[in-house]
Image (cartoon, grey):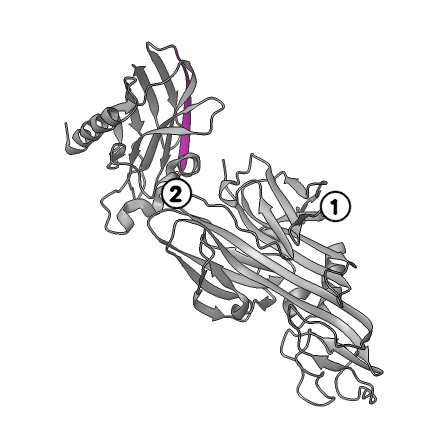
Amino acid sequence: MNRIAYRFMLAGAVTAGAAAPAAAGTVEMTVNIPQLRVAEYHRPYVAIWIEEAGKPEIRTLAVWYDYDNRENGGTKWLRDLRSWWRKGGRTAAKPADAVTGATRAPGPQRVKLNTPALKPGNYALVVEASREEGGRELVSMPFTWNGRSATASGTGRTELGAISATIKP
Amino acid sequence: MKRMFLLAATALISSSPLYAHNAWIKPSATTVSGEDGWVTFDAAASTDVYNADHAPMALEQIKAYAPDGTETPIENGMRGRFRSTFDVHLTKPGTWRVGIQNLSVTGSYKLDGQEYRVGGRRGPPPSAGGPGGAPGGNPPAGGPGGPGAPQRSGNAPNFVASSADFSPPAGATDVKLSLSGMRNEVFVTLGNPSEVRLTGQGLEMQPISHPADLVADEPGRFRFLVDGKPAAGLEVEAVPDGRRFRDEQGTIAATTDANGEVTINWTGPGLYWLHTDYRDESSPRPGITGRRFQYTANLEVMAP
């Protein structure tokens, strides 16, 4: 595991310990970032979150951005993840350490993310990608949570490829 | 058309060529992330909004207010031929208000048979053959000027400086004085939005849909208030940017309900010029016989 994955696990453990007594869940997912033949390629900023049907609040699982950029810590362009930013990203000046990661290279990115405990109900797992000198795309994958397990999948057309996820308690 | 007529009427009592056209302030962004941020603005008046081809907005009138209401200087101001530009450094999270808000008494009265005009002009109209008005300025209020125009006789009006708290002197007759106000603003949000503060004076817009939350596929809702009270029956219009690249005006029209509220169904993402005006013959205080207010918000509507 690389440095970033470790950062996830460490921070996630701390968060889970401090949060509600209900056990947190995990989302194991594969996010395909397409290989693009362009003259100037920058890895996309990506936000991953869960939203509950009919509720405005979101639960951010991951934000991959240029967090060690010297200019403003890379936060200047977080607003370009415009759906995530409007729905909840903007509530903090920068994403919590628990969800922060570096941008990722093209190819299948396999990650295991921590989620807060979910009550049974209808949700969507959402992935949004925005690329400098490129486009922006959002893939929303509905799932029903029964307390045991759920799967969600979807495919982007431009900035994201196939996405699949398994949600467990 | 109605708007143009009203603006033309206002221009007669105004010192600024701005009022004869549609004044606008165009932001480089209204949603900003990071610990601080900069936004740059163009400000001008023109027939087609956001198309700088007529007159710059006076920088002296433009102010920026931080989310806590403190005034912050605008920076790097430059007055061009067709538009002014300036920057605002956002140093505190929340919703900033950038733009013009002014309030003054304008009109006329008579005293001892002499006519007095309040506001609108700093001095008498230029005499025949003298230097003309500034480029883009209004013609003298007295009628046709220029060489050969007939000189006005000895009963030419006197001009009185205006202010927001002006009252006519004792013994004044034929009093026609309005409290006139203009607001033209942009809301810029660094990080998490904050509540938009109202002053309770003049014509104001209270966002029901926060300016940082506007999305093309959700209607925008706004409440209009005159001196702090809901203004029913106001004709509100939203004009999208980019008039040069389409045939039709594309204006979205709506009327405020009993609560002063209006719903705008956006026709797509982009910058919108949200405008309304208000006039009545009420007396907000002794000696004042009417109110004339204009309001403009420059709003960014995001793609969903």
In this figure, which residue is indicated by the disc labeled 1?
B233
For badge 2, the amino acid type reads Arg
Residue A106 drawn above or below residue B41: above
Q: Nearer the viewer, residue A150 or A90?
A: A90
> Does residue B247 show up?
no
The relative height of residue A19 versus residue A80 in the rendered view (above or below) is above
* Most frequent secondary structure within the magenta stretch: strand
Residue B78 versus residue A57: which sits nearer the camera? A57
Left or right of residue A150, residue B176 in this image: right
Amino acid type of disc 1? Gly
Q: Secondary structure at mark 1?
A: loop
Pointer 2: what residue? A79
Q: CA distance from mark 2 to mark 1?
A: 37 Å
Query: Where is residue B25 shown, x and y percent of the image?
Result: 54, 58
Disc ID at residue B94: none
Q: Residue at x 44, y 56 (%)?
A: B66
Residue A144 lies in the magenta-colored region: yes
Residue A38 in sight from this viewpoint: yes
Position of the N terminus of chain B, as image quadrant, is bottom right
